[in-house]
Image (cartoon, rainbow, N blue to C red):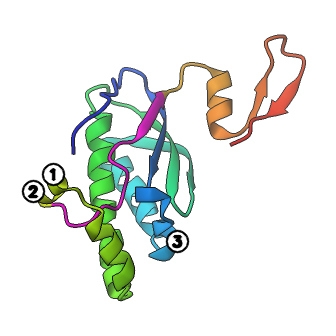
C-alpha cells in the first residue's frame, strides 16, 4: 500500500481514523469488532503504544493513540494493522459463507491492487492521522467538553 501522508511520530499522541471500503459496515456484517480489540492489544504489547480512547463504528474506527517511541513508523503500524484486520474480516465472511460480500470486495480491487496480490478491498487505502497539539483539540477529537477562548463557557463537541 502506498503511503500518501507520512506521519512524523515526534508528536506522541495521535487521533487516527480509518474507514472500511465504500463505508460498508464490515465490522458489523462480519461480527468483527473483536479484531480491533485484538490489534490494540497487539500494538500495546509489541510497540508500547497506549490506546487512550477508541470508538469502533460499524464501518470505521477512531483511535486516540499515545506513541511512546519516536522511532515508530505510525504509517507502518496502521497499514499492517489494517492488512491483518482485513485478512481476519475476509476469513469471518468466508466462515459465514457471505459470498455476495466477498464478491463485492473482490471486484472492487483495482487492477494495480490485483497485480500486487490483493484479493479483496476491505479498507480505504489510507488513514487520517492528526497529532494532538492542545487540550482543546484533544477534547474535540475525543468528543469531550472543550473550552472557549475566555474559559467561561463549556460546550460538547459533536462527533
Please state the extent of the stretch shown in magenta in the rendering: 118-130
Mark with earlier residue (3, 1): 3
Q: Which secondary structure type mostly characterizes the magenta part of the structure?
A: loop
For disc 1, the marked residue is 112
Residue 39: image quadrant is bottom left
The secondary structure type at the circle numbered 3 is helix
Identity of the residue drawn at 30% across and 61% down: 121
The secondary structure type at the circle numbered 2 is helix
Tell me where residue 8 appears, x and y as whole percent: 33, 23
21 above or below 66?
Answer: below
Identity of the residue drawn at 36% across and 41% down: 48
Residue 115 marker: 2
Q: Is residue 7 left or right of residue 146?
A: left
Could you tell me how far apart the alpha carbons at marks 3 and 1 are, in whole angstroms? Answer: 28 Å
Residue 101: image quadrant is bottom left
Q: Nearer the viewer, mark 2 or mark 3?
A: 2
The secondary structure type at the circle numbered 1 is helix
For disc 3, the marked residue is 28
Mark with earlier residue (2, 3): 3
Amino acid at each position: 500500500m502506498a503511503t500518501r501522508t507520512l506521519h512524523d511520530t515526534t508528536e506522541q499522541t495521535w487521533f487516527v481514523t480509518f474507514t472500511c471500503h465504500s463505508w460498508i459496515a464490515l465490522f458489523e456484517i462480519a461480527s468483527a469488532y473483536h479484531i480491533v480489540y485484538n490489534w490494540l492489544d497487539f500494538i500495546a504489547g509489541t510497540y508500547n503504544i497506549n490506546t487512550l480512547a477508541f470508538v469502533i463504528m460499524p464501518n470505521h474506527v477512531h483511535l486516540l493513540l499515545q506513541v511512546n517511541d519516536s522511532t515508530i513508523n505510525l504509517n507502518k503500524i496502521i497499514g499492517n494493522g489494517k492488512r491483518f484486520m482485513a485478512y481476519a474480516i475476509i476469513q469471518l465472511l468466508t466462515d459465514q459463507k457471505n459470498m455476495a460480500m466477498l464478491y463485492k470486495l473482490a471486484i472492487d480491487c483495482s487492477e494495480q491492487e490485483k497485480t500486487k496480490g490483493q484479493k479483496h478491498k476491505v479498507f480505504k487505502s489510507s488513514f487520517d492521522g492528526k497529532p494532538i497539539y492542545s487540550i482543546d483539540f484533544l477534547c474535540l477529537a475525543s468528543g469531550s467538553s472543550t473550552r472557549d477562548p475566555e474559559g467561561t463557557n463549556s460546550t460538547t463537541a459533536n462527533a
